[in-house]
Image (cartoon, rainbow, N blue to C red):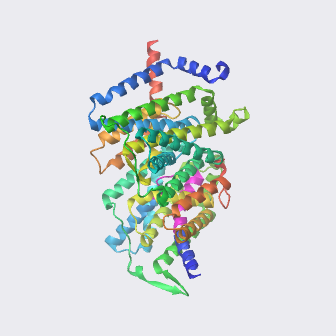
Amino acid sequence: MMMAGGTLPGMLAQGIAAHRGWIALALAALVLLALAPLYLSPFHVRVAQLFLLSAALAIAWSLLGGFAGYWSFGHTAFIGLGAFVAGLVETGWTWPSPALAFAVGLLAGALACALLAGLIAYPILRLRGIYFAIAMLGVAQVLGELNNSIDAFKGTMGIVLPQLAPRAVEPATFYYYLLLVAAAVTLAIGFAVKVSRLGYGLLSIREDEDTARMLGVPTERYKIQTFVLSAVLTGVLGIIYAHSLGFITAGSVYRTDFSLNMIVYALLGGMGTLIGPVIGAGIMVVLTQIVLGRLLDTHMFITGALLVILVMLAPRGIVGFVKPILARWRGGFR
Amino acid sequence: MTLILQTIVDGLVLGGLYSLAAIGFSLIFGVMNVVNLSHGIIVLIGSYLSYILWRTLGIDPLLSIPLVMVALFGFGYVYQRGLIQLAVDRSSLLASMLVTFGVALMLRNVLVLIFSPDFKSITPSWAFNFFVIGPITVDLVRISALAASLVLLCLLALVLGYTHMGRVIRATAQQDLAARLCGVNARHVYGLTFGVSAAFAGASGAILGIVLPFSPPDEAHWTINAFVVVTLGGVGSPSGALIGGLLLGLISTATSQAIGPAFPNAMMFLILVIMLLVRPAGLLGNAFSGSR
């Protein structure tokens, strides 16, 4: 494969050229989503907000889980850590304006996530497969419990976060746009990773880590970099999510279902792709929030059944399911 | 001193239960590498079956154990052959984990619909008897729970060690290709293993019902416990599960005694993570080759 010298700008330019269609599609979707609050009802704006958050989280998770095949079962650790560090920083001191407080909180939260990820990366990334997954689950549980039980962290009491939305703007709409920006940035970063040397390195790790290492791919460094990047992105999304809630407790940000949903979305859409997590999040959010919203009693049953059916019918995700059909369809016209 | 002794006794009782609840998980993991996230819900199905038998027919929970085991053996066999095997064939092992998660959600919802999300408990007539050994008090319930767990674990060890079925299961766990070449029907063995696993999970559920109150959302707790036990003890062997379970029981009672009742889970996971990093083969160190 030609690597255009392997420099990041070179590879980026090459990647953009190779994926023009997708980029046009993403930009069109961005415009459409930016206009959405104008014609959606408040309820649907909230659903769309949840969709953006879910899709962005699933992409952030995918950097490590989808590209490198390291399935983390505890990414909610970074949502919680980011949210609480930001919350403690923002409420611990008096800041001249909410925007400044948010900026400092965002920075502190992201830094904390990077620090934690950097500290545990080397030992924990030596574990593979299911052992890595469970170790991450453990990390999330320990962090959540500590946050909950140590009074100084206010996990049980909760933190009221400063309101960021200007008075003239509806908060739901404000956070919608904030999440839209965050999701777009996450997607762009995901794209940059995918087409860069790092992305190819991660794929080689997923396919055969030992061989990759033998061939000179710096697997250890790539894994650690990606882990930290994924953690920071997840943390930032967690911070925005926490502000959109307005009030957080340890129970509302350290949630196992966050960790699981990220995997479900990515798997449902298509593991190792960028569009996959977005499609997966879209389907699941629409299904659970709108279609199943009325069936509160059997909500869990139907979600579970869907999961089983989807894995059975489309084991490679929607993308893996649609791609061959598309290819055949295109072939028919040639 | 009394306090320490009492803590140890309580920890061992809890640990026996953890061991029994985890052995099925450990077997499935060891034999077919499937992480069964629906394990906890099978434990709870055992509790509820025993609860129904006790409420409607007045069968003592300890006597209902064989009935529960037979019923869940059948369930486990069908579950594996009808669903898990298909999922493993059609996609990957990790995806099969998602299937078991989906099933856990479904069954949990069914349990909530039938039994309500409230806590239930099984209290046979002898539930409040206790006896005193020196300075320590022991409830009859707890000591019989520990005894039943140990008896069942020994039974399983004997079955695995000395019966035809046990030998075939162990052979398939070691090298499924070689076992198949020797004429073993691997799929049937997988089904049997799942059946045995579900039967013992159910038995632990029936015993747990007399010791602790239970409700459907507890299932996650039992699945995670099973994983910790397996990581501590080592995969696929009753002795590993026993050591892991007893350790976990001791750790969690000692932590809530010494540090505070909010910390056993955090301590448990801390030890889990440290164990994975320092000694991923478990204390007994068998068959953890896939971890690195």
Q: Give the side of residue A289 with respect to residue A131, left or right.
A: left
Work out whether residue A314 can be spotted: no
Residue B234 drawn in magenta:
no
Residue that appears at 40% across and 34% down: A178
In percent of width and height, residue A296 lies at: 29, 49
Q: From the viewer's side, name the closer residue of B71 and A248.
A: A248
> Which residue, as the protein is rendered here, is positioned at the far front?
A96
- Is the magenta region chiefly helix, strand or loop? helix
A144, above or below B18, in the image: above
Q: State the extent of the magenta-drawn residues as a range.
A: B16-40
Q: Give the side of residue A85 with respect to residue A97, left or right.
A: right
Residue B23 drawn in magenta:
yes
Q: From the viewer's side, name the closer residue of A141 and B26.
A: A141
In percent of width and height, residue A302 lies at: 35, 46
In percent of width and height, residue B173 lies at: 62, 53
Residue that appears at 48% across and 43% down: A105
A51, above or below B274, in the image: above
In percent of width and height, residue B290 lies at: 64, 48
Q: From the viewer's side, name the closer residue of A280 and A250.
A: A250
Quarter that holds the N terminus of chain A: top right
